[in-house]
Image (cartoon, helix red, strand yellow):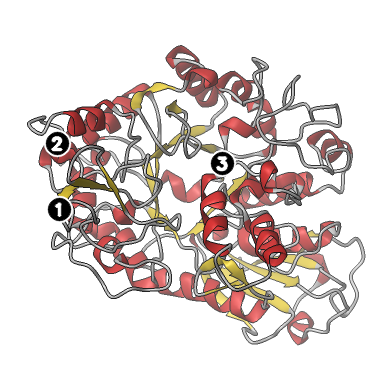
Amino acid sequence: MNNKHTNWYKNAVIYQIYPRSFCDTNNDGLGDINGIISKLDYLKELGVNCVWLSPIYDSPQKDNGYDISNYTDIYPPFGNMNDCKKMIAEMHKRGIRLIMDLVVNHTSDKHKWFIDAIKDKNSPYRDYYYIRKGKKNGKKPPNNWKGFFGEGAWTRIEGTDEWYLHLFTKEQPDLNWENPKLREDIKNILRFWLDLGVDGFRCDVINLISKKQDFKSRFPKPALTGSDAFINGPRLHEYLHELYRDVYANYDCMTVGEAVMATSKVNISLTDPAREELDMIFNFSHTDSDNIGGVKYFYRKFKLTRFKNRLNKQQVSLEGKGWNSLFIENHDQRRSVGRFGTVEGNINSSKALGATYFFLKGTPFIYQGQEIGMRNAHFKSMDEIKDVESHNIKGILDKMPLPKKKMQQIIYDVSRDNARTPMIWDNSEFGGFSNIEPWIRLNKDKDIVNVKNALEDKNSLYYFYQEMIKFKKEHQVITDGSFKMIAINNPHIFAYVRENEDEKVVVISSFSNKPRKFKYLERLCDSDIKITNYEKHEKALQPFEVRVYLIDKK
């Protein structure tokens, strides 16, 4: 096999764009491809060298594009294929690679495959989906599995005794990867985009593509009944290796998988280069550290030691075995400002958190607006929230014996829409995002937190991120150095060492709003501080102070 697959992703800094909320140039209230093109110089100046683009494929938009009706065409309000080709060319001209969102666990119910599958029992696409007879003459679903948005995992096909499987909304039927013809069609979709010049894929809920074939009911669980049958299924590794062998190996591309509820063991198995499956996955254990049981709607007080332990486990478990993705925000997570020990309105706390995750071993991801410190939306009404997940979960929480106001506040606090409000470019009426009212309301602090203000303030978070990106590019130790945590049980300070033969980098961040002594500082010289958020350094760390030391070993 002539393997063209290289490790360029290890030196990448990846910026995620949520297209409907990035920049609107055709004044319909939605972001678009030309809006992305118009901001490429901004991304180049920031220093990122790769973009992950959330779905732009044609879609009914039931789940904001994660319900795809045509994998090889563009959602018309975003533009067309010529716009897409121009975007890829303009990115490459600036040294920016592009990874697309790959959503192949399910399609839209408006995809031609599904329309044909439910219309004709003899259709060649019938077996592209999981269609099973229901119980009790078709009146009950085939089993008791539950989906990720709080609904049952089966929907009855109207006028029949048959049901189809969907782990998300009923408009997102799951694909049957047991069918080799389906797998060939998916490979052709991959080749289509790679031949257009795309540099890889972020693989949506990729560890759900294999299901146990017994389709038996499971003992009811509070959250995901049946999850043992559809998370990390029996043929997952086989399917992923098949994609690598037949497609990825023939291109210099990268893959990063969204792996639901992945343990360290699963992470290792999916990213082990010898297995030839995925280059890295998103491990959510650290972003789940402020909730209970991995359920974001039951959040708890942030505890730094819990956060540290989970990140440490990710780092140590993959050493020499796989590769980490590094992130604190994305389109499914609420904003990091005011989260993970940070304080809204305190820029130093965001700088401390930023440096803490950015210099760990792995590929850092920056979500749009993270670099200027965009905050959560502070919703006041369900009418302001568009996310299908939030509305489904509200229906479940409303049935719980808890105060209604409390339940509503939980939705407002953790809704995915907190990260999906429009990018704020300036302090004009619509934040420079559009000339008309956007599809979802703008953040109310747009006059304070916007790109224009950030670029005019030399101490802004934007320039701090720019400085971190530059430092990473200039020092190979950030890519290949070993990792070792310092004082892992310290409840206020996150510190670690990255080291190779030539250099040592020490990152020390305070997550306290008070000065904190840290004995390890006595080993270090102020002259070695290369990145910091304080001009003067005391013997103790100041509130939310971060110091990044570089020690030349030559």
Horizontal side of 443 relative to 419 (left or right) equals right
Q: Provide the residue designation for mark 1.
A: 137
Rendering coords of residue 193 (x, y %): 34, 27
| Residue at image point 35% right, 61% down | 146
Q: Answer with left or right where residue 320 lies relative to residue 21.
A: left
Pair 2/3: label in front: 2
Q: Point out residue 380 in the picture as x, y percentages from the top left corner.
A: 76, 50
**Residue 250, quarter of the rendered image:** top left
Which of 112/323 is in front? 112
- The secondary structure type at the circle numbered 1 is loop
- Determine crowd level at label 2: few under 14, some 14-19, many 20+ residues with C-alpha closer than 10 A: some
Q: Is residue 235 above or below residue 467?
A: below
Q: Which residue is mark 2?
A: 126
- Amino acid beneath label 3: Gln
Give the side of residue 16 with respect to residue 356, left or right.
left
Q: Mark 1 and mark 3: span between their CA atoms?
A: 47 Å
Label 2 vs label 1: CA separation? Answer: 21 Å
Residues under labels 2 and 3: Cα distance?
Answer: 35 Å
Relative height, residue 455 to residue 534 (above, below): above
Image quadrant where one finds the N terminus:
top left
Residue 484 numbered mark, or none: none
* Nearer mark to the viewer, of 1 and 3: 1
Q: Secondary structure at mark 3?
A: strand
Q: Is residue 285 above or below residue 188?
A: below
Q: Earlier in the sequence, mark 1 or mark 3?
A: 3
Q: Position of residue 445 (x, y in %)?
A: 84, 44
Q: Quadrant of residue 303?
A: bottom right
> Looking at the image, which residue sits at the far top?
82
Q: Residue drawn 82% across and 31% down? A: 426
Query: Mark 1: which amino acid?
Result: Asn
Q: Which residue is mark 3?
A: 16
Circle 1 packing at 10 Å, graded few (<14), some (14-19), many (20+), is few
